[in-house]
Image (cartoon, helix red, strand yellow):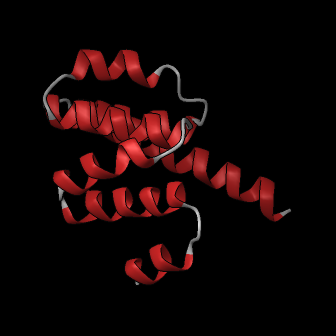
Amino acid sequence: MMEKLRNNSTKKSMQAIYQAAYGVYRNDIFSVRQAVPKMRRSDYRTYYETFLLIEEGMSEQARDHLKSIRRQWMQSALLAEIERKLGYREMAIQHAEEAVNALQRRRALYAG
């Protein structure tokens, strides 16, 4: 399915976003790393750059990096991952809930 999405998109930067998302899903860091330079500067590129920093154990740099992301759900999702990796389960859950709530608000905004 992801291949179909990627192949249907004519923009290389969108294909790269799909590639990175699928790489995260499969826990294929190499694919994510390959996709990021192909993305145009956007919250999505910063999101995946920050994801790579987290995976490399650079949580402080990741915290600084995610401050430039405008989408609240992205910030909260990344913060949840940082806290989870550091062993702060309760904080991770709180940030994950914030991410879900922000996505639901965004969905309601565009649905209504």
Q: Residue at x 80, y 64 (%)?
A: 111
Q: Residue at x 52, y 54 (%)?
A: 13
For residue 98, say whether it is visible: no
- Image position of 66 with respect to 1: above or below: above
Give the percent coordinates (x, y) of residue 43: 54, 37
Q: Residue at x 59, y 51 (%)?
A: 103
Give the percent coordinates (x, y) of residue 101: 57, 47
Residue 110 left/right relative to 50: right
Q: Nearer the viewer, residue 26 or 6?
A: 6
Q: Can you say which quadrant of the picture contains the N terminus?
A: bottom left
Give the percent coordinates (x, y) of residue 25: 28, 63
Q: Residue at x 13, y 28 (%)?
A: 57
- Image position of 50 with respect to 15: above or below: above
Q: Can you say which quadrant of the picture contains the C terminus?
A: bottom right
Give the percent coordinates (x, y) of residue 18: 43, 63
Q: Nearer the viewer, residue 5 or 64?
A: 5
Residue 104 left/right relative to 7: right
Residue 111 left/right relative to 41: right
Count of residue discs: 0
For residue 101, say whether it is visible: yes
